[in-house]
Amino acid sequence: MATLFISDLHLDANLPELTRLFERFMAEQAPQAEALYILGDLFEAWVGDDDDRPETERFISSLRALSDQGVPLYVMHGNRDFLLASGFAARTGCTLISEPSLIDLYGTPTLLLHGDSLCTDDVKHQESRLLLRSQKWQEAFLAHALDKRIQLAQEYRGMSREHLRDKPEAIMDVNAGAVGALMQEYGVRQMIHGHTHRPAIHNFTLGAAPARRIVLGDWGQFGSILSCDKDGCELKRFPG
């Protein structure tokens, strides 16, 4: 059995083929896993745990079905679904994990995170991240009625797309210095993250010792999965 890692699915009711791909993965491959970690941006947007729209219930149902089969399910916040909270955990049976999280992955201490906090060259994103993660902003947003929150989320996504269109490609990747500093802070030689949509396994030297940073891919026509067992880790495509 293997431990599986995914991120950046950006599930949205307006993307039915992606929804079906996710449901197929949750029904066919995820039940065979020792555990499933979702490292952020499972949803294109999450407007609150009280979202009871049919499309949301459909996503919740797939997650709950996996939990009910006894597969440990761990979910981390991303920059799109940072409002996931205890209500979501109760509905899906998942465990919400903090960012970063340190786990023992078959004997290798491994640091998990979504990844946007490492994109320190993107100053505007970091400023926005600080605001959106603040208790004051979140309380004000959640005070709106559900319909209003849905409308605001759509407006925010439109503004974000405009911002990304003019942003230099280089600053949207992680900063090597930020990666090294965080790994040294936690005393690890292995890191797994998503966010950048640039799946790869990067081997490098950190403090004269070998280190590895594994980047998860986003989902579209195919799913991007990291499968790890006692023999190592491999990036795979679903369906294979």
Image (spheres, rainbow, N blue to C red):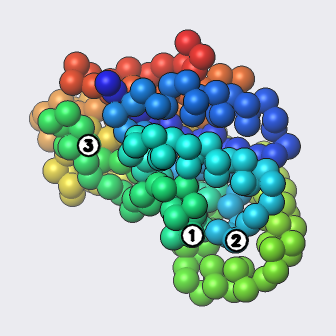
Q: CA distance from mark 1 to mark 3?
A: 28 Å
The quarter holding residue 91 reads bottom right
- Relative horizontal placement of residue 233, taking residue 53 as reference (left or right): left
- Pick the front one: 107 or 36: 36
Label disc, if present, on residue 194 of the rendered structure? none
Q: Amino acid at mark 3?
A: Thr
Residue tagged by mark 1? 87
Q: Where residue 17 sits in the image (x, y, percent)?
A: 79, 30
Labelled pair 2, 1 in contact (Cβ < 8 Å)? yes
Q: Where residue 238 sits in the image (x, y, percent)?
A: 57, 20
SS of the residue under disc 3: strand
Q: Amino acid at mark 1?
A: Gly
Q: Earlier in the sequence, mark 2 or mark 1?
A: 2
Residue tagged by mark 2? 50
- Pick the front one: 52 or 148: 52
SS of the residue under disc 2: loop
Residue tagged by mark 3? 110
Q: Quadrant of the N terminus?
A: top left
